Amino acid sequence: MSLQRTFIMVKPDGVKRGLIGEILKRFEQKGFTLLNAELMTMDRTKAEYHYMEHQEKPFFGELVDFITSGPVFAMVWEGENIIEVSRLMIGKTSPSEAMPGTIRGDFAFSKEENVIHGSDSLLSAEREIENFFGLLKKRISRDDFPFEDR
Ligand code: RTP
Ligand code: MG
């Protein structure tokens, strides 16, 4: 087991459908710690960097169009094995393959608009967190955030 940080994002369809609260609730109930969050509309540069692994794919243009089409809710979460566990909570990319009980299994009905993103590796988590919050060089610490004692 290892304490990890990951980048989780409610996509524009999830924000429009009012699913931010439901998604926050699931991650909080799982015992993960929210380190940062912001509602923002991505520009194309940020979106293209975020999805750089897909730049040669035929759906890349539509993916960037969609992810920049409205506000996203970008978050940094911390927890034990959170990269793998959050991907399990999110479910498979395609809603027809996502298991009931997962976020996509319960709420997504389109492969292109599938509610939520989660980093798929430690390397992509670091890159994605830096892209959105610029906190890579200075490692995020709980002390950096105005939490009350808990
Ligand atoms: P994400 O990166 O958004 O968390 O999704 P993922 O890991 O489950 O899936 P990935 O393979 O990284 O694909 C990124 C997003 O691209 C869209 N996609 N469209 N039209 C298609 O065949 C196709 N394939 C993938 C999906 O919206 C997916 O979430
Ligand atoms: Mg992915």
Image (cartoon, helix red, strand yellow):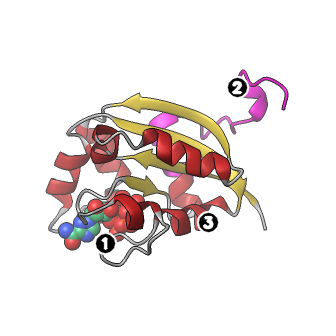
> Which residue is depicted at the point 41% across and 55% down?
117
Q: Residues within 10 Å of mark 2 (few under 14, many from 20)?
A: few
Q: Quadrant of residue 113?
A: bottom left
Check contact, mark 2 vs mark 3: CB within 8 A. Answer: no
Q: On the image, numbered disc 2 is attached to which residue?
A: 145
Q: Quadrant of residue 108?
A: bottom left
The quadrant in which the C terminus is found is: top right
Q: Nearer the viewer, residue 3 or 113?
A: 113
Range covered by the magenta-colored residues:
126-150
Mark 2 vs mark 1, CA separation in Å: 36 Å
In this rendering, position of residue 55 left or right of residue 88: left
Mark 2 secondary-structure assignment: loop
Check contact, mark 1 vs mark 3: CB within 8 A. Answer: no
Q: Residue furthest bottom?
A: 97
> Which residue is depicted at the point 23% across and 61% down?
112
Disc 2 under 8 Å from ligand 1? The reply is no
Q: Residues within 10 Å of mark 3 (few under 14, many from 20)?
A: few
Disc 3 under 8 Å from ligand 1? The reply is no
Residue 17 at x, y percent in the picture: 30, 42
Q: On the image, numbered disc 1 is attached to which residue?
A: 94
Q: On the image, numbered disc 3 is attached to which residue?
A: 85
Q: If you read the primary sequence from the N terminus, does the residue marked by circle 2 or circle 1 appear first?
A: 1
Q: If you read the primary sequence from the N terminus, does the residue marked by circle 1 or circle 3 appear first?
A: 3
Q: Nearer the viewer, residue 95 or 122?
A: 95
Disc 2 or disc 3, which is closer to the eye? 3
Q: Which mark is residue 102?
A: none
- In the rendered structure, which amino acid carries the disc numbered 3? Val
